[in-house]
Amino acid sequence: MNGIHILTLLTVLPLIGAVIALFAGKHARGVAMITALFCLVVSLLIWVRLPAGGGIGMVERVAWAPSIGFEYYLGVDALGALMLVLSAIVTLMSVDASHRVHHQPGLYYCFVLALESFLFGSFTALNFFHWFLFWELSLIPAFFLIKLWGGPRRGPAATQFLIYTMAGSVALLVAFLAVFLSTGSMDFIQLTAMAQSGALEQAITAHLGPVSLWLAIGVLAGFAVKVPIIPFHTWLPATYSEAPSPVTMLLTGAMSKMGVYGLLRIALPIFGVQIAEMRAPLLVLAVATVVLGAWAAVAQKDLKRIFAYSSVNHLGYCLLAIFALAVPVYGVAGHTNQAAALNGVILQMFNHGITAAALFWFVAMIQLRTGGIRGLNDFGGLRKPAPVLAGLMGIVLFSSLGLPGLNNFVSEFLIFRGSFPLNWVAASVSVLGLLITAAVILNVIQKVFSGPTPERWASFPDLHHSERLALAPIIGIMLLIGLVPQLLLSTINPTVVNLLAHWRF
């Protein structure tokens, strides 16, 4: 297994598993579990074999249709490799949480594994056409997973999800067609180099006129829907609440990272100058995503909708740092602040993916024990009959809160450490998001686990041994990153330095 083929192997492996699962009947979940485990092993091999200098490694490049800019061009640095590991972990979590799927299980697990493959493709592609193909293909299994296995309003939720994300994709496609017409290239690395030298803007202006800013807006619109950025978030609460909880785990744990990844791999490297020009309104949107996302969570009474809006809030921290660092800086201090913010963003993507997926996993476990009940005010005192569930879910909730010693604290600290010197006003207002999130999380703990136990929940089942065993590695990851963040940061930081050296604001 060499670096020339390992990325292709990782992308193809879930598709092979998907085909087998489709015809495996009652054994489909076992096929999906084995496939997801193999994918996790391969993704970890990619992580440990990354180039020490932080550049793109394991490159695979084959001419596809050179005359129209299409290439099969793969490669990863720590940013892409960490997203591969995250996607593999979240898919494995989702498959484990899907043991109650009895309606067409072969088709269900086929879609889950296909989605995993398309996630891998989007995190490894370095040519726009190749990347956009996987970006769009990921919508198909996600749509059907919501449409066929979702809640009572799954139809409208799936349709809204598809329309919103397709609209963003159209904006992306139009913008990059304009870039291709101006440069003849869809190569992310080449376009980044052109942007750094100023040749990209000159080429666009020479062919199309002064439209670079509008192209940047089109690209940002595509990613704004995917992350999502407020006010492009209205598809998310309904989608997350109507999708089966294991599918919601995939949506929040992995698919939402495609938007943040796109900002870091495409938007900032290629349109950094234009984003710097729009920095003030973009920071306003980022702060709104942080604060209003948390505030909206306060008003919710459904656990899935609470965690859906909390997810918006936590990804808002990534947006805060991304737009805060989009400014020319001079001297060691300025570059150190940018590096801290970007380290925080990449680590937050991973941390949020693990934590948010785990929260929806616990919601799935609660629904399994209650026949689908998940209202915030429907419980109380569950700590007494189910102390292990309460304790482990409490750890995940405190991780979401950002408690020191757990994974989210490290990434959020780095984000604010880097963002405050770069834009103290936006960072200061965003601190309100931390306070509101704390109130939301503590309210969930109080309403669900504290107080007297209602008679109907007196015999509420605690976690059984297989559930505890499945959750143990996830809780371990949260504790390990919280206590020893250098395990990831030592690999992430060289990529951060390399990225910043090639970006121009």
Image (spheres, rainbow, N blue to C red):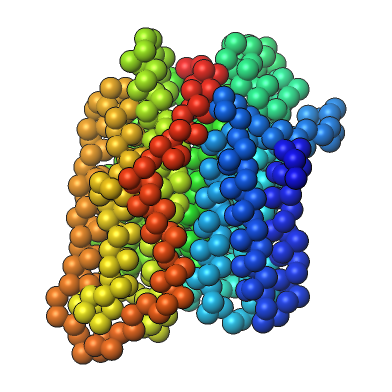
Residue at left offset 23%, top offset 39%? 431
Residue at left offset 38%, top offset 49%? 480
Q: Quadrant of residue 363?
A: bottom left
The residue at the far left in this view is 451
**Above or below for 293 versus 153:** above
Residue 461: horizontal and vertical position, in percent?
34, 84
Residue 328: horizontal and vertical position, in percent?
41, 14
Residue 34: horizontal and vertical position, in percent?
65, 66
Number of on-image labels: 0
Residue at left offset 43%, top offset 35%? 489
Towards the viewer: 15 or 492: 492
Residue 260 seen in the current view: yes
Q: Quadrant of the N terminus?
A: top right
Q: Quadrant of residue 329?
A: top left
**Above or below for 120 versus 396:** above
**Above or below for 352 versus 382:** above
